[in-house]
Amino acid sequence: MDSDDDMLGAHEMGSGEDDFYSGDDDDYNESDGDETDYGFVEEDVDDSLLIASHRSQINYVVLKEEDIRRLQMDDIGRVSMVLSITEAEASILLLHYHWSVSKVHDEWFADEERVRKAVGILERPLVSTPDGGEITCGICFESFIPEEIVSLSCGHPFCSTCWTGYTSTTINDGPGCLMLKCPEPSCPAAVGQDMFEKFASKEDREKYYKYFLRSYVEDNRKMKWCPAPGCEHAIEFAAGTSNYDVSCLCSRSFCWNCTEEAHRPVDCHTVAQWIRKNSAESENMNWILANSKPCPKCKRPIEKNHGCMHMTCTPPCKYEFCWLCLNAWTAHGERTGGFYACNRYESAKQEGLYDEAEKRREMAKNSLERYTHYYERWASNQTSRQKALEDLEKTRLEKLEKLSDIQCTPESQLKFITEAWLQIIECRRVLKWTYAYGYYLPDHDKKQFFEYLQGEAESGLERLHKCVEKELEDFITAEGPSDDFNHFRTKLTGLTSITKTYFENLVKALENGLADVDTSTQGASSKSTSSKSSKTKGGVVKGKGSSKNAGSSRNSDGN
């Protein structure tokens, strides 16, 4: 396996969407008193210090195929050496115990005989082999000389041709070949890796070793495959942290816990609810309920697309009825209000006959409008984030070199622009998921505070996005160096830092369940009690909590 230094370096170069937020002091955030380095001065830093710093910040490692294979062989070699068994037998043990070396050791030293029987590593043959003469194959029942017969530890005899067919068939049936047993029915002896190496064709061996490699990740509680299509990297995750957001070398950021896209600060349960809601038929049914009515005869939903109340159902029904009261049109005409009104409906509504249906339709419409509000903003931020990713790539490939030539500034001193784009990408991701968070937030007091924080975050992000997207173009299209470029650098660096800090605080607030609202509510309650007590003594106390509540409520309807 490559050294940790190599893997960390590869991760640093390949990942464009690292997690910027964490509640721990040793994560990506620097200490509160430090200033972010945006590359104005280049310093020679010892590589070992950078690597040590990365180790304390990153709680996962991205593994390539060769890294996984090397780790796998290391585990096999360790078990083989400690237990004094062959590597083929060590592989069988590790497959049985889901690649847990410690579990293998514990079980083996606790009761070796029981483990051997359970996994199929037998110490003595179950059948005896004749000393001389020909031996009958247990599959094709043909006779062979002893040299042409191959047996497992159980001693059951089979010819080479039958072994080849047996291994080939099981490999093509799928990963079940990894737990293959002796062809003899009810025999517990396991077929080891050495047998596949001996009898399987080159193509079948490649399939077998692919299954073998994948089992090391899929059966390992500390590893998962990157969910990006076509990506063959795995993530080894360190336990003991609440931050599950990881980034693969393919630039895919995802949650290690649920393998959905990275969604911090929203928990996995809320994300699963939101995704189900977006893909389910529930919103279609809400739309149908809010915008259509069932035909009184065939009960199929009908949408009204013209102004007239005279409705005709589609063939083969062709029932004609009034849109308002749903009664037959033959009973309507000028005496009931004409084509655009219905006196019957109005009188029945006054009597309360349509209250329940109207109430259900109104509730469905309100629910649909509320969902649409949050979904549109969720999707809009996703689109903006995707556009920012494209703009970042274009900036790296084209704009930085051009800007460096025009402004006579080394590209190494322009990384503050890249930093700004990376911050925008991360903030768009966070902001997107705050709308899913807000949709499921029931508490009214917390909702006001949340919408205030969300609105401020969105406002700050828009300022940063506008600065790097619009104002930068003036310097790229300039004919020569501009005296205002240093001012732009300072402005963009400052906006990036402020936006980063604000979103860090937003993430922490949401992960803490907006606990500040509970604190402020208790404080307001205690102040109210204190105020009443003071008034009974003739004094007047001015409340200080009211201005904060007013600040929170001023944006309550904005989102």
Image: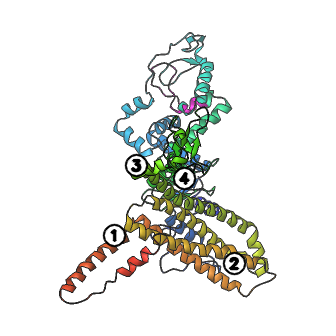
User: Which amino acid does the dot numbered 1 rest on?
Assistant: Asp
* Residue designated by label 4: 235
* Residue designated by label 2: 471
User: Which amino acid does the dot numbered 4 rest on?
Assistant: Ile
Mark 3 to mark 2 CA distance (whole Å): 56 Å
Q: In this rendering, is residue 471 above or below 512?
A: below
Which of 274/191 is in front?
Answer: 274
Q: In this rendering, is residue 346 above or below 532?
A: above
Q: Can residue 355 be seen by looking at this rendering? A: yes
Which of 151/295 is in front?
Answer: 295
Percent x, y of residue 539 = 22, 90
Is tag 3's residue or tag 1's residue first in the polypeptide sequence?
Answer: 3
Helix or strand or loop: what does disc 2 sit on? helix
User: Which amino acid does the dot numbered 3 rest on?
Assistant: Glu
What is the crowding at mark 1: few (fewer than 14 residues within 10 Å), some, or many (at least 20)?
A: few
Helix or strand or loop: what does disc 3 sit on? helix
Percent x, y of residue 134 = 57, 10
Helix or strand or loop: what does disc 4 sit on? strand
Q: Which span is picked out in magenta?
A: 177-196
User: Which amino acid does the dot numbered 2 rest on?
Assistant: Glu
